[in-house]
Image (tube, helix red, strand yellow):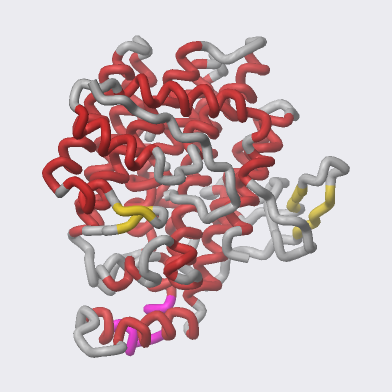
Amino acid sequence: MMSMTCHNLDFGTRVLDLVAVGSSSNASIERHSVKNHGKGFTGKVYGARRMVCCRQNISRARAFSTKTSVALLDGVGERTAPVLDLKKEAKSPISLANLFEVVADDLQTLNQNLCSIVGAENPVLMSAAEQIFGAGGKRIRPALVFLVSRATAELAGLKDLTAKHRRLAEIIEMIHTASLIHDDVLDESDMRRGKETVHQLYGTRVAVLAGDFMFAQSSWYLANLENLEVIKLISQVIKDFASGEIKQASSLFDCDVELEEYLLKSFYKTASLIAASTKGAAIFSGADRSVTEQMYEFGKNLGLSFQVVDDILDFTQSAEQLGKPAGSDLAKGNLTAPVIFALEKEPKLREIIESEFCNPGSLDEAIKLVKQCGGIERAQELAQEKADLAIENLQCLPQSNFRLALQDMVMFNLERID
């Protein structure tokens, strides 16, 4: 039997790796909703809002809006909703250490349990799993599970988390880890978070098997939760992962890809798991359906905002900051929000991309054009719009440190592109 070492949680301020579904009964409705959100961003006007930010005496920022555009609310009409504008006032950056302080004990317990929950039947597979568990991940998804669990538990009168809350957090992290292992194989990535990937160390065969094993192990623990709604919810995520990869593979170097297609792919690959995490947590708290649906929407909008920010950083940060080559998505033909927006204004960019960067220096030229044509700024507006929606989704929760941490998580994401 192989001895495994549990690594301490890393709560530094480095860039997040997001890098994160509804129940089967309403999956089609939720996917339609994702597409509708995309339609709100295809024009040049995003809706004017007046924002006011003020500082709480506990060094956390709050933000409010006096107007929200119709496009953001999918036709509901204008109404008061809080939004964020981090450029309105200078403030100290939010750190993950502060964000997760209220669930630090929960995360420490999770970190210890991950070693035992994976098991040790196969030393090679376990070594591969440990490699990525210990590669500096921030445990964003389980942290969201704990924050939503504790925020919604107050609504149901629970004094502490249940064993199902904790097991859900562990399952979510295992599924995320499995998806990262497979992503690195598909993308032929040699590095993740500055360390060698599993397939680089152990070969493609072992990496694929390690990811499959972790998916299977998490599914077994999921079935043992004996909650059909949550089982359907999380099972849909694994299907969405595959759908997202197929969508991405079938649209490489396609300059006609539309923004709503990009958003749907981003939902499948990133936001689906985050949405399932937050909704599942609320379900285990015994929250009303209206609350569980708002938590699903919160996770979806936060996940989409995170993905857009990650795609912006691929153009604005250095290889050292990213832990991978800058512009790597574009180089592989994966056209993200900044590129989609830039293509609307620069025909030359299309020519370069469709040539698949065959000429020396063409990738650098494409990156320069994306920046010059306002692709970055419009993508920032898209990330802001999704963040606004996520904050609005939290209004059903009672005021607490846990809700405040969830709001700050949205702000932390936007601060990454400041």
Q: Quadrant of the N terminus?
A: top left
Q: Specify whether residue 237 is painted magenta.
A: no
Q: Quadrant of the C terminus?
A: bottom right
Residue 153 visible in the snapshot: yes
Measured as percent of width and height from the top left, residue 70 is found at 59, 54
Q: Residue furthest left?
A: 205
Q: In the image, is residue 248 above or below residue 2?
A: below
In-image side of 282 versus 102 (left or right): left
Q: In the image, is residue 306 above or below residue 157?
A: below
Measured as percent of width and height from the top left, residue 319 is found at 42, 69
Look at 39% across and 46% down and name the residue there: 270
Look at 50% across and 72% down and name the residue there: 316
Which image quadrant is residue 324 in?
bottom left
Residues in magenta? 342-350
Look at 36% across and 84% down and name the residue there: 364
Which image quadrant is residue 30 in?
top left
Measured as percent of width and height from the top left, residue 68 is found at 66, 54
